[in-house]
Image: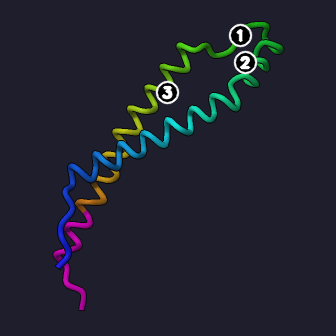
Amino acid sequence: MTEKLNQLKFGAAGGFVAMIFTLIFEVFLLVKFVPFYNSLLQSVYGVGGIGTFEITIIMLASAIATLIMGFAFFWLFAWVYNKLLIIKVK
C-alpha cells in the first residue's frame, strides 16, 4: 500500500522550492534587463528608472506571494493525492 503524504510538510517544501526558483529568476532578470530598462527610461523621460530599494521591495513581495501560492498549490496536491489513495482502481 502507498503511504499518505504529509500535507503540511509537502506544502511547505513546495512553497519553499517555488520561492527559491522565483528569487533565482528575479536575480537573473535584475542582472540582465534592469540596466537596459533604466537607461531607456533615462533617455526617454530624463529621469532614472527603478532604484535598489524599489527592486528589493518588489523581490520581497513576489517571494512572499510565491511562498504562499506554492504552499497552497502543493498542499492541495497532497490533499488530492491522499483522497485518491482511498479510491480502488478495478
Q: CA distance from mark 2 to mark 1?
A: 6 Å
Q: Residue furthest right?
A: 43
- Label 1: few (<14), some (14–19) or many (≥20) C-alpha neighbours in 10 Å: some
Image side of residue 64 versus residue 43, left or right: left
Image side of residue 16 versus residue 41, left or right: left
SS at mark 3?
helix
The label number, if any, that marks residue 38 in the structure image? 2
Query: As shown in the figure, which amino acid type bears the numbered disc 2?
Result: Asn
The label number, if any, that marks residue 1 in the structure image? none
Q: Which residue is mark 1?
A: 48
Q: Quadrant of the C terminus?
A: bottom left
Extent of the magenta region: 80-90
Q: Which residue is mark 3?
A: 59
Name which quarter of the figure residue 37 lies in. top right
Q: Is residue 15 above or below residue 87?
A: above
Image side of residue 68 versus residue 89, left or right: right
Residue 81 is covered by the magenta coloring: yes
Query: Which residue is more in the foreground, 23 or 70?
Result: 23
